[in-house]
Image: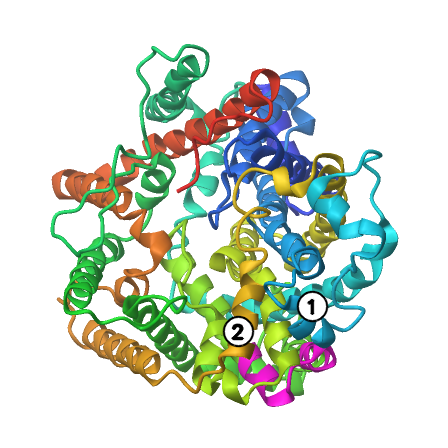
């Protein structure tokens, strides 16, 4: 009896959520995930832990906290156990922190920043074409072999910080202001998405289920008393643990989640991937059925379209993306326009509140006030435009680039919050959209070069921190905590995580040589952005009308599908499927999405919503066990297979 009472008191006393211990634990979690993710793929050559919008490198640590630390605290001294609100605070901080290293923000960015002087050669003409257009503060110079040491390693392993300090300072100013602008946008749209449109937020559902508490005494409570949860946990962890034996014994039969070979059914048509990702299946169960159905249906539509185009010889040119990529981008911008249009009344109230603080709209439950949000977007965008102009971009091109960047970030966040897609990126970047709209023939060399540098901020098309900011705002809403304090704690997570990631990445780079790193962020694409820039300088082109036509097709198609969905209640196709069905990352997840749809369809068909809710613990357990299995695989690689680890998780 006393145990139940103490637990209740602990929950009430910690009900605010953003407590000192929750923030401290959140910072510990951020440091742990930054260190592991930064080390895993490049150095240990183990799994890539943060390609997705809900990184497994975060979730595995959160599972340790919920299933390990909190029950231990409840057993030793119930008064110290973490409440639901505190756990959501930790999750919000950890989620945004996991998007910093590796395949998040800084992995690809640091490689791009170091590339222009190291990879320059007489053959590629970078010294003649690129170097004169690079301001001295924009990129670290290769003086005394500073960049050569980063890519090839130095005997001492010490970092020449003097070469990095100035460029990193100015780039961190841009990143910080851009992140704040995106936070302001998330605040302005939170109420519309959470309360008015009631988006599902499938990526948050397992977190919410995992920390539910039934107020019953005992060490384990809530979901952890459910047998289906532990069955899913054993299944997710066990399937990965089966392969651990293969690490040590080649004769052991391995479960190949990545598939044996992509399937080609018709000559000239794209290959269909047959890989299975338990992480995608687990989160897919929490998405709406019509969204899941539309995702794999439109994949088939784009597959047929691309195959027909291949057979008739329709080609938009190298390095520009397929026709479906431009259609997806057009559909995305149509989705953003519709989202802003449906939110027009709410946004009007936001602006009125910003102008007149006495206006009858309550913004006390937001991370920042509406006045701060509105003027933060305006002034922050002004700073970003000034920064880009100082770097060499012409002002009107800078305006178009920021609008394109904001559009992609907003659309990406909306799609992730509504569909729960883990792996989502568009084949056409904001930079490519701008250059194809205006044509490189009208651009100065400094504009082309600076746009190439900004590609480093958009690696994997994850939209900086926008999706994690939107999901973290939802966590704060679920926690019922002080959103202002939650916003500050998330900012603190970035202030701690970014310097730590830079320190570790540069330290290991100069110690081992970033050229020897495994995985994508440092090894691939870091110099290709500048190769494309030089190509645009040498062979300038006008506006790409053929690509813009397909962009327009995407706008028209998305508009038509949206109208049909809102006018016809029986219409089965969700417009989101049209916006993402042809994107490269989503196509690799299609088979897993189909499995998730089939499982949920059968469960709902047999037992309705009641049976669906009964089986939620099974999929939450599957995700928990799988993420912990990825973490154990990393530990095994570090201990026994350092530098030759096993890539068991990507997408």
In-image side of 647 versus 275 (left or right): right
In the image, is residue 112 above or below residue 640?
Answer: below
In the image, residue 110 lies at what x, y percent?
A: 67, 53
Q: Which residues are magenta?
A: 384-402
In the image, residue 631 lies at what x, y percent?
A: 53, 27
In the image, residue 426 lies at what x, y percent?
A: 40, 63
The answer to which quarter of the image holds residue 634 is: top right
Does the segment drawn in magenta span residue 276? no
Residue 161 is at least partly visible in this image: yes
Q: Looking at the image, which is closer to me, 394 or 239?
A: 394
CA distance separating discs 1 and 2: 33 Å
In-image side of 294 versus 517 (left or right): left
The secondary structure that dominates the magenta segment is helix
Q: Looking at the image, which is closer to me, 152 or 36?
A: 152
Q: Secondary structure at mark 2?
A: helix
Residue 406: mark: 2
Residue beneath the point at 41% across and 50% down: 423
In the image, is residue 616 above or below residue 201?
Answer: above
Residue 199 is at least partly visible in this image: no
């Amino acid at each position: 009896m006393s145990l139940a009472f103490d637990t209740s008191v602990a929950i009430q006393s910690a009900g605010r959520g953003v407590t000192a211990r929750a923030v401290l634990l959140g910072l510990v979690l951020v440091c742990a995930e930054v260190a592991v993710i930064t080390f895993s793929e490049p150095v240990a050559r183990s799994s890539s832990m943060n390609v997705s919008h809900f990184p497994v490198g975060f979730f595995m640590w959160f599972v340790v906290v919920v299933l390990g630390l909190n029950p231990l605290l409840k057993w030793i001294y119930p008064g110290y156990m973490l409440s639901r609100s505190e756990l959501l605070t930790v999750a919000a901080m950890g989620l945004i922190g996991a998007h910093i290293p590796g395949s998040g923000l800084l992995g690809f960015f640091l490689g791009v920043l170091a590339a222009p002087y190291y990879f320059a050669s007489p053959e590629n003409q970078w010294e003649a074409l690129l170097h004169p257009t690079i301001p001295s503060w924009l990129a670290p110079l290769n003086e005394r072999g500073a960049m050569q040491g980063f890519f090839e390693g130095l005997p001492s392993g010490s970092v020449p910080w003097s070469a990095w300090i100035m460029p990193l300072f100015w780039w961190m100013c841009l990143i910080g202001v851009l992140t704040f602008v995106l936070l302001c946008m998330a605040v302005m749209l939170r109420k519309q998405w959470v309360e008015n449109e009631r988006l599902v937020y499938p990526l948050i559902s397992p977190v919410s289920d995992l920390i539910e508490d039934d107020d019953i005494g005992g060490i384990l409570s809530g979901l952890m008393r459910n047998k289906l949860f532990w069955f899913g946990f054993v299944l997710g962890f066990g399937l990965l643990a089966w392969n651990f034996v293969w690490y040590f014994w080649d004769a052991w039969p391995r479960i190949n989640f990545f598939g044996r070979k992509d399937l080609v059914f018709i000559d000239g048509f794209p290959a269909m991937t047959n890989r299975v990702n338990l992480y995608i299946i687990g989160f897919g169960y929490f998405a709406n059925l019509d969204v899941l159905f539309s995702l794999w249906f439109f994949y088939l539509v784009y597959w047929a379209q691309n195959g027909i185009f291949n057979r008739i010889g329709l080609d938009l040119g190298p390095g520009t993306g397929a026709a479906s990529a431009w259609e997806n981008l057009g559909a995305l911008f149509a989705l953003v326009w519709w989202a802003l249009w449906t939110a027009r009344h709410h946004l009007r109230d936001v602006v009125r509140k910003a102008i007149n603080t006495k206006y009858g709209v309550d913004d006390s439950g937001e991370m920042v006030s509406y006045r701060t949000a509105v003027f933060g977007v305006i002034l922050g965008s002004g700073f970003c435009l000034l920064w880009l102009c100082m770097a060499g971009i012409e002002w009107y091109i800078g305006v178009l680039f920021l609008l394109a960047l904001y559009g992609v970030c907003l659309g990406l966040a909306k799609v992730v919050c509504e569909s729960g897609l883990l792996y989502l990126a568009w084949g056409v970047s904001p930079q490519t959209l701008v250059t194809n709209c205006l044509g490189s023939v009208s651009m100065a060399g400094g504009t082309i070069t600076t746009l190439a540098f900004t590609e480093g901020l958009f690696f994997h098309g994850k939209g900086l921190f926008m999706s994690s900011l939107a999901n973290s705002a939802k966590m704060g809403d679920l926690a019922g905590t002080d959103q202002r304090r939650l916003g500050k704690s998330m900012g603190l997570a970035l202030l701690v995580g970014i310097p730590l990631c830079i320190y570790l990445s540069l330290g290991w780079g100069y110690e081992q040589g970033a050229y020897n790193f495994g995985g994508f962020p440092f090894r691939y694409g870091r110099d290709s952005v500048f190769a494309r820039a030089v190509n645009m300088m040498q062979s300038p082109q006008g506006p790409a009308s053929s690509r813009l036509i397909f962009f327009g097709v995407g706008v028209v198609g998305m508009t038509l599908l949206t109208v049909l969905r809102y006018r016809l209640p029986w219409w089965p196709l969700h417009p989101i499927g049209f916006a993402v069905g042809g994107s490269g990352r989503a196509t690799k997840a299609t088979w897993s999405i189909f499995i998730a749809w089939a499982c949920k369809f059968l469960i709902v068909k047999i037992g309705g919503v009641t049976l669906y809710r009964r089986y939620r613990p099974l999929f939450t357990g599957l995700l928990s066990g799988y993420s912990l299995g990825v973490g154990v695989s990393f530990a095994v690689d570090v201990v026994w297979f350092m530098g030759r680890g096993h890539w068991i998780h990507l997408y």
